[in-house]
Amino acid sequence: MENEKILTEIVIEKFLNGGQGLGHDEEGKPVFVEGAYPGEIVDVRVESEKKNFMLGKAVNWKYRIPERNQPVCKVFRKCGACEWLDLDYNFQLASKETIITEQFQRLGNIDTTGLLQPILASAGTLSTRNKMVYACMGTPGGIVLGLKEKASNRVIEPKGCKIADEKFEKIRMTMQEIFNELFTTEDIFHERSRRGFLRGIAVRKTEYTGQYMLILITSFNANKQVNMIKGKVKSRLSFVDSMIQVYGKKKTLLAGEYNTVFGKGTLTEKIEWFDYNIPPTSFFQTNTKMLKSLLETIKEIAQPNREEVLLDLYGGVGFFSIYLAPLYKKVILVESQHDSVKAAVANASLNKLTNLSVKGMMVEDYVDESVSIQPNTLIVDPPRAGIDKTVLTKIIEMAPGKIVYVSCDLGTLVRDCVILQEAGYKIDLIQPVDMFPHTAHIENIVRLSR
C-alpha cells in the first residue's frame, strides 16, 4: 500500500492487558503492537492512529526473544483462537502476573504486594478446551467450517487446532464434508438478506465421562435438513453421543432455542463424587484439565463453615454451589438463564443436596428483593461486564463477611474491587488461575473481607 505507515525498530517494553506489546515511536507516542513480545525489536505497520496512541502489527523482526518458539499450528496468527502459542509457557505465566500487578495499580491504585499469589498453572497447555464454536462461510470451493479470524468475519480452517480436544478436528472436517455433500453456499445464513439456514456447529465434551456433543447451529428450526444430516453423522462420527439443533438469528451463534436430534439433551460431567448436567447452551468452565483444580482453589479461598450461609450469584448450572454445598449450612444459587436454572435444580436433586436452593431470576431482582438476607460468604462470577452498579450497592447493603469474586476480565474486576474497598472491604488475596493457556486471558479469584 502506498500510504501505509511503517515504524522501524520499535522496542517492545511490556505486555498490555489485551496481550499486545507496548512500544513508543521516536516522539514518544505509544504504539500497541500485535504479534510482538517484550524485549523484541520490530518494524510495525500502523493499522490505526489515534490522538494519543497507535495500533499496529509487527511485520519485521530485528530481534526475537529466545522464549519465542516455533508455533505448532499452521494457521497461528491468522485465526483468533490464541495469541501466545509460540511463547514459552513459563514466560506466559510470569507475564500474566505482571499484567495483574500493573492493572490493579493503574486502574485501582491497589498495591498487590503480599496479596498476589503465584499463578496456578494449567495442568496441560494443549488440548485444554472442552468447547469450540465453528462458523460457516461460503467460498468458490464450497462451504468452509472454521474459526473466525481476529477482528473479522472471515473464517479460517483450523487444520488441527492445538488448544482444542483432538477429536474436535475430526468432527469439524467431517461436518464440512457433509455440508458440502448436502448443501451449497446459498444455504449459508446471511445476516443482511436473512436468507439461508446454515450458521455453523459447536462441539462440547466432558473430561471425566468422555461424552461428545455435536450442536448444529441454524437460523430456524430446520427439521428436514437436520434429518438429512443425522444419518451421515451417526455413520461417520459414531463416537458422538448426542446431536442437538440450536436455532435463532442472534449474533451470538449459541443463543437460541434448541431441540435434541439424537442422544441425551445434556452432557453429564462427573467431578470427584459430584454429577453435573450441562445443557447445550449453558456456560461451563472451558479448560477441561482445570475443573478440579479450580473447584479446590475456590474451596480453599472461601474457607467453608458448616454453620454458615453461602450465596452464589450468577451461579449457572451450579459449578461452585454443587461442590461446596455439603460444607455449608445453606446455599442459595441465583441464575437467570432458563436452561441453566433447570440444570441447577436437576443437579441439586441428582446429588441429593437438600440444603441447596435455586432461584431462577435476574440477579438484579434477587438482590433488590432479598437485601435483608445476610450471607456469611458471597461467591460472584459475573459476565465480563462485571457486577452491575445497582447489584453492587445491594451486595454492600447485604454485608456478607466474605466475598469471593471470580472474574476473567481484569478491568471490571479492579473497578468493582475499588468500589468494595471504599465500602469497607479489604482485599485478602488475589489468586490467578491459568484457565486460558496460550492467550492473554486470565482468570482471577479475589477474596475480600468486611
Image: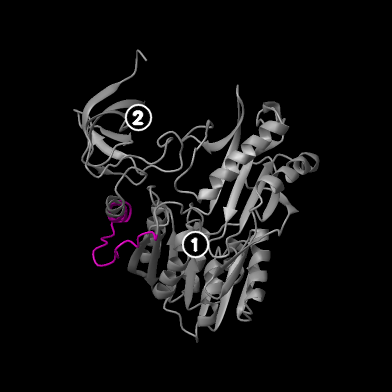
Tell me the crowding category of disc 1: few under 14, some 14 to 19, or many 20 or more residues within 10 angstroms, Cα based. Answer: some
The residues bearing labels 1 and 2 have C-alpha atoms spaced at a distance of 34 Å
Residue 50, which numbered label? 2
Q: Does the magenta stretch include residue 389?
A: no
Q: Are marks 1 and 2 in contact (CB under 8 Å)?
A: no
Residue 352, which numbered label? none
Q: Which of marks 1 and 2 is in front?
A: 1
**Residue 54, picture quadrant:** top left
Which portion, as a residue range, is magenta? 96-123
Going 44% across and 65% down the picture, which residue do you hit? 405
Q: Is mark 2 on a helix, strand or loop?
A: loop
Q: In this view, does 15 lie above or below 368?
A: above
Residue 438 image point, x, y percent = 38, 48
Of callouts 1 and 2, the N-terminal one: 2
Tell me the crowding category of disc 2: few under 14, some 14 to 19, or many 20 or more residues within 10 angstroms, Cα based. Answer: few
Q: Relative to residue 299, is residue 391 drawn left or right?
A: right
Q: Does the magenta stretch include residue 102?
A: yes
